[in-house]
Amino acid sequence: MEAKDLMEKAARFHGHICPGLAIGVLAVKYLLEHDFNYSPNEEVVAVVENDNCSVDAIQVLLGTTFGKGNLIHQDYGKSNYFFYNRETQKALKLSLNSNIFEKKKLSKHERVKYLLDSKPEKIFTIYEIEFNPPSLAEIEDSIPCDICGEPTMNSRLMFYKNSSMCIPCYKAQRK
């Protein structure tokens, strides 16, 4: 699939066209060319180290979602993307190169065009990495928080002063 077609689909989901979305599209373009396809279940896993526009392209074009547990966010503020294909046991890391816009005076539109016209290998440093994907998503029981009563995933409950509580209540109790 061409980058332009991928961008159109991603933009429908994301709501607008921007350089960040184009970065995600370019990452997915590379993956589609290297045995990573749309994942209706949890065959493909994406671990992203940012929460910018690029992640929307990855989500809609690869089928990775937080709800299925095959889109994992690590809040490091870095443009690094790790992909695992459980079927082929292939794993890749795409890391955005820091000098992708050598010309400093590009408009938003020019940046998008430049990205979509580029080869992914020019925009990212690409590594094969060890196949060590996050575990499959688990369904957990929800237990009411002793403070607010809201159901909370068992693994997210905090224990303080003989009470089990959700994270917001725990933080409030610790103030």
Image (tube, rainbow, N blue to C red):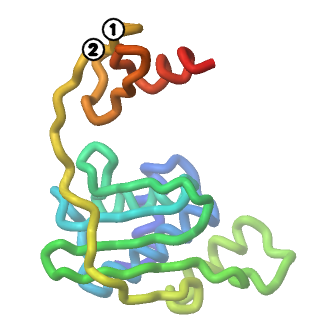
> Of callouts 2 and 1, which one flags the residue occurring earlier in the amino acid sequence?
2
What crowding class fits label 2: few (fewer than 14 Cα within 10 Å), some (14-19), or many (20 or more)? some
Q: Residue at x 79, y 68 (%)?
A: 107
Quarter of the image with the C terminus in it: top right
Q: Residue at x 73, y 65 (%)?
A: 108
Q: Which element carries disc 2, helix, strand or loop?
A: strand
Vertical side of 9 occupied by 161: above or below: above
Q: Which element carries disc 1, helix, strand or loop?
A: loop
Furthest-left residue in this view: 87
**In the foreground, 19 or 135:** 135
Q: How many marks?
A: 2
**Residue 127 found in image quarter:** bottom left
**Residue 19 found in image quarter:** bottom right
Q: Which mark is residue 144?
A: 2
Locate residue 155, reporting x and y percent: 28, 35
What crowding class fits label 1: few (fewer than 14 Cα within 10 Å), some (14-19), or many (20 or more)? few
Vertical side of 61 occupied by 120: above or below: below
Q: Which mark is residue 149?
A: 1
**In the foreground, 38 or 7:** 38
Q: Residue at x 47, y 66 (%)?
A: 7
